[in-house]
Image (cartoon, rainbow, N blue to C red):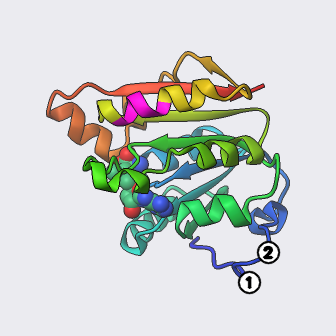
Amino acid sequence: MIYQPANYLDPLDWRILFGREAPVEIDVGCGKGNFLTWVAGTKPEHNFLGVDRQLVRLRKVDKKVKRAGLTNVRLLRLEFTYLIERLIPDASVAAYYIFFPDPWPKRRHAAKRLFQPAFVEQLRRTLAAHGAVNVATDNSPYFEQIVPLMTASVHFNAESPLSLPEEARTEFENIFLSKGDTIHRARWRKK
Ligand SMILES: C[S@@+](CC[C@H](N)C(=O)[O-])C[C@H]1O[C@@H](n2cnc3c(N)ncnc32)[C@H](O)[C@@H]1O
């Protein structure tokens, strides 16, 4: 279901959004939703939010979610930086999946990348204790920016990246793998 908050000023109430209390996991830039539908199907006891700025993509995900009969998924069309800064309550997220975030390869566009010091601080603020940040990207320069940013934060410990089966791959991952690109993966856990 593509969720429309009553307003875009008050923090979200996960219990109202999902109709139950359960750990909340967020797929940031969920794209066409292959990973989101897979992970939500494997963990019916968790709540999953898929966020993307593109409505056409979310409509496709919505169809996939309905076809799969998943009741633990909600979708939100919103700029993620606004969502995390303004609407996600403190210490309320069990995991973030940030798979193939837009790399903005041109130097003059680097400020548009999600990963910035202020974003890492919002990850810290919103994650529950022992919550995880999972990252995957094909873009080496972006990965080389993300790792020191996360490592510089005293609030996170690095862990082995998630090992996922083939059917969990995202649409972009399949494209990059078919081209023979290297995929960089990482995971950090809030202390
Ligand atoms: C490169 S695609 C990756 C999609 C998906 N994670 C995958 O791996 O197939 C990036 C996605 O993130 C979305 N996106 C990028 N920046 C965003 C932002 N700031 N807020 C919300 N969505 C964003 C784009 O619309 C796009 O669907």
Identified at 80% across, 49% down, the residue is 92
CB-based contact (under 8 Å), mark 1 and mark 2:
yes
Label 2 beta carbon within 8 A of ligand 1:
no
Q: Amino acid at mark 1?
A: Ala
The quarter in which the N terminus is drawn is bottom right
Q: Which quadrant of the view contains residue 134?
A: top right
Residue 176 picture location, percent across and down: 23, 37
SS class, disc 1: loop
Nearer to us in this view, 175 or 151: 151
Q: Give the label on residue 169, or none.
A: none
Left or right of 77, for residue 140: left
Count up the numbered dots.
Answer: 2
Residue 99 picture location, percent across and down: 44, 42
Provide the major secondary structure of the magenta segment: helix
Looking at this view, name the residue that lies furthest to the front. 108
Q: Residues within 10 Å of mark 2 (few under 14, many from 20)?
A: few
- Would you say residue 127 sits in the magenta stretch? no
Q: Amino acid at mark 2?
A: Asp
Q: Which quadrant of the view contains residue 49?
A: bottom right
The answer to whether residue 166 shows anywhere in this view is yes
Residue 95, relative to residue 20: is it above or below? above
Label 1 beta carbon within 8 A of ligand 1:
no
Residue 106, relative to residue 77: is it above or below? above
Q: Which residue is mark 2?
A: 10
Q: Which residue is mark 1?
A: 6
Dot in front, 1 or 2 = 2
Left or right of 66, for residue 140: left
The answer to whether residue 31 shows anywhere in this view is no
Q: Magenta region: which residues?
A: 142-146
